[in-house]
Amino acid sequence: MIRLVYILLVALGVSSCYKEDPQPKEPKPVIVYPYVTDTTTNNVPTFVGQTWVLTGVRIGGIGNPQTVSDTLQFITNTSYKYNGYSSKYSLYYTGGGFSFTINGTPWGNLSGTIYEYNLKSGKIEGLKFIDITPGSSNQTNYFLWMNKI
């Protein structure tokens, strides 16, 4: 009887083994985005040489945007002119979009997320920004409308 149990256990153990595939598995493809760098490294994306017009600002989540016509002229990877006044900006890839910060606006230093579509189409339509000026509460949402000209 013990011999029969031993034989069954050995047969069960052998039948549960499997041969491993000798072929190596394909590595996962690396997704390369055309715009995956920040402006401080002098790679794409870049606003350098571009001019955008801020056409609307809505403060808070409800209501129509206030119509404005402010010009943003991007000079270098970190500096731009807001209606002729020099200030700083930044743009860098975050994994889900691009963090875009424009300092020196009438509403403070505004920071929000824009997307590859916005960069390619030259349109920002009602995307949310917050004031990151030191001392601000970061509680007020600003929604911006901008067009590349």
Image (cartoon, grey):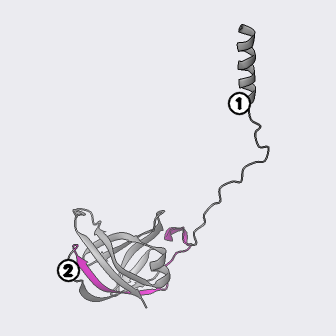
- The residue under label 2 is 63
Check the picture and name the quadrant holding the N terminus.
top right
Identity of the amino acid at label 1? Answer: Ser
Counting from the top left corner in percent of width and height, residue 92 is at 47, 68
Check the picture and name the quadrant holding the C terminus.
bottom left
Quadrant housing residue 51: bottom left
The residue lying at 48 percent from left, 62 percent from top is 95
The residue lying at 36 percent from left, 84 percent from top is 146
Observer-nearest of 45 and 17: 17
Question: Against 4, is 97 above or below?
Answer: below
Residue farthest toward the right in the current orientation of the protein: 22
Instruction: Tell me the crowding category of disc 1: few under 14, some 14 to 19, or many 20 or more residues within 10 angstroms, Cα based.
Output: few
Q: Which residues are magenta?
A: 35-61
Q: Let me know if residue 58 is in the magenta part.
A: yes
Residue 40 in view (yes/no): yes
Observer-nearest of 77 and 91: 91
Residue 16 disc label: 1
Observer-nearest of 81 and 25: 25
